[in-house]
Image (cartoon, rainbow, N blue to C red):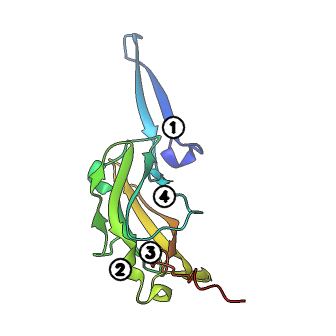
Amino acid sequence: VPITSLSDEGRYVVHFWAKNDANKEAREKKEFVKDTKAPVPEMTFPSENEAQMGTVRIMGTISDNGAGVKVDGTKYIIGVITRPELNSPDWKPMDKSTLVSWEFMYNLDDFSSSPSSHGVHISGSEYKIPVYILTEDKIGNKGITKKEIKFDKDGSKPIMSIQSPQQN
């Protein structure tokens, strides 16, 4: 039975029965997992809806229903508009990566001088900056997931208003 004939991912058991020339029966079973999908990352902080600036801890969870997450296979690229390739040399290792979570620190102010080169303008001084997460499981299934961070290029600038003297 070809494994490609199995439509769903998951655990399977194959049972074997055989008889020899003396009509003695032998039975055996073999368990296996069909896994063709990469682990799935989620970004838990920061929220995609809250504007960020300065150095930010970017973190999330990761799950895999098959072979399990390859800890050093979770990497990132931030601030690149075009989706990177799986084999790009630009992938950076996470500051911290486990079987169930990932995180890295990044100074978003690095994008301040030219935010439109690193993301998509939303309104005012706010931009959506793409964060690409590369995941890999223990048998080599790889995938890229795009998340976004809202960046406010003017968010850390002080605002000054004149209180006195008041204008009539």
The three-letter amino acid code for the residue at tag 4 is: Pro
Q: Secondary structure at mark 1?
A: strand
Label 3 sits on residue: 156
Camera-near label (3 vs 1) is: 3
Label 1 sits on residue: 10
CA–CA distance in space, label 1 to label 4: 32 Å
The three-letter amino acid code for the residue at tag 1 is: Gly
Disc ID at residue 164: none
Mark 2 vs 4, N-terminal side: 4
Label 4 sits on residue: 46
Which residue corresponds to the image point at 46% horizontal and 53% vertical from the top-left?
Answer: 41
The three-letter amino acid code for the residue at tag 3 is: Ser
Mark 3 vs 4, N-terminal side: 4
Q: Secondary structure at mark 4?
A: loop
User: In the image shown, does 44 or 87 lie closer to the viewer?
Assistant: 44
Camera-near label (1 vs 4) is: 4
Label 2 sits on residue: 110
Examine the rendered structure and indicate whether residue 113 appears above or below residue 62. Answer: below
The three-letter amino acid code for the residue at tag 2 is: Asp
Camera-near label (1 vs 2) is: 2
User: In the image shown, does 45 or 68 lie closer to the viewer?
Assistant: 45
Q: Position of residue 53 (x, y in %)?
A: 44, 71
Which residue corresponds to the image point at 45% horizontal and 44% vertical from the top-left?
Answer: 64
CA–CA distance in space, label 3 to label 4: 17 Å
CA–CA distance in space, label 3 to label 1: 48 Å
User: In the image shown, does 31 or 66 lie closer to the viewer?
Assistant: 66
Q: How many marks?
A: 4
User: In the image shown, does 167 or 72 lie closer to the viewer?
Assistant: 167
Which residue corresponds to the image point at 39% horizontal and 73% vertical from the top-left?
Answer: 108
Q: Secondary structure at mark 3?
A: loop
Mark 1 touches mark 2? (CB < 8 Å): no
Q: Residues within 10 Å of mark 1 (few under 14, many from 20)?
A: some
